Image: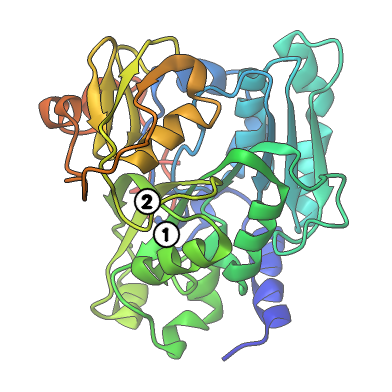
Amino acid sequence: MAADDDVRAWVRDYYGRVLQKSADLATNACCATGAPPPFLAARLANVHDDVLARFYGCGFPIPEAVEGATVVDLGCGTGRDVYLLSQLVGADGFVHGVDMTDSQLQVARDTVAWHTDRFGYAQANVAFHQGYIEDLRPLPIADGSVDVVVSNCVVNLSPRKDLVLAEVFRVLKPGGEFYFSDVFCDRRLPDAVAFDPLLHSECLGGAMYRADFEALARRAGFLDPRAISTDPITIQNADIEAKVGAARFESTTLRLIKLADLDPQCEDYGQTATYRGGVLGTGQVFWLDDHHAFEIGRPERVCRNTAAMLSGTRFAPFFEVAGAAEVHFGPFPCGPTMAAAQYGSPAATAPRAAAAPRACGPTGGGCC
């Protein structure tokens, strides 16, 4: 087993010296994502080419309803997601980017003025900080001050995911959210894979068995983790495929909400939730997770946890939640909502941008 400092050294060297552009990756694990939804594609066109050229991520963990919000991006790299969020939070919001790699942060900082002018802001609404995602205390981010924390294919690189989750929980406001994409595995990896420097730096060795990660999240205080989307990762490198053996990896986007007094399982209190509309990028249907979809004007029966996630967070202005959770009717059969059963998946209600995905990795098979 490698020491924490050794793992950080591998990652810092790989992303600071070895990689000079996305195409230098040995696999597509660190950039296994498709084209952005249209509302992000238009904003992605406003991001500097130097930032895009050195982006390494496995999704689009850009959450909804962040106008005016304070956001933190863990492992921000050159700042692609920070600059996407900068446009979404607007001049009244603020985005902090955190990374430990000097060369990545330099690219991000060198383009602050360019982006501020491009977005038409009188002053920058972003700041980039060098630091470790396991310890945010040295940074100007106070306890309970953040609306949303995001991360894009970075938590897997950390040697102490428990500390990452504890720090996220600490800085979030009540009702705040950790919204992130990362690489997970279908099994617990042996040390020979987990602590191989190349495999770890390529986002494979540090990938956790998802059930273990969700148990870790609950211990940190995120009592009801929700998956939004999951996509298989095709490694596309024969030597590395041989090293990982039968293990299979996937890119998953998760929503962890900081709410007290959630039930450990779904419980029925006779509540319903109706989406009023108005969340940017959702069209007619809002997806809370991969089986809770809400069509404008259609009441849906929900468990107490889901009702709390819609009424006790930044989503409250967009939903009417009926029922006071005073009478318990037993366990709630938490299958797909009516809208989710009708539309099948978030992809069915959120058309993708027409532009072809950018290639990454050794064969151009990824799409970051």
- Horizontal and vertical percent position of residue 358: 43, 36
Q: Which mark is residue 64?
A: none
Badge 2 is on which residue?
252
- Horizontal and vertical percent position of residue 24: 53, 56
- Horizontal and vertical percent position of residue 310: 43, 29
The reply to whether residue 281 is in sight is no
Q: At x 34% / y 21%, what residue is drawn?
A: 322
Q: At x 51% / y 47%, what residue is drawn?
A: 57
The reply to whether residue 122 is in sight is yes
Badge 1 is on which residue?
183
Query: Which residue is farthest front?
Result: 327
Where disc 1 sits, the SS reads strand
Along the polypeptide, which appears first: circle 2 or circle 1? 1
- Where is 194 relative to 219, above or below? below
Q: CA distance from mark 2 to mark 1?
A: 6 Å
Q: At x 28% / y 70%, what residue is drawn?
A: 186
Where disc 2 sits, the SS reads strand
Question: Residue 141: which quarter of the image?
Answer: top right
Q: Residues within 10 Å of mark 2 (few under 14, many from 20)?
A: many
In front here: 342 or 332? 332
Residue type marked 1 = Val
- Where is 202 relative to 142, above or below? below
**Callouts 2 and 1 close, C-beta under 8 Å:** yes
Give the side of residue 131 with respect to residue 255, left or right: right
Give the side of residue 366 with respect to residue 131, left or right: left
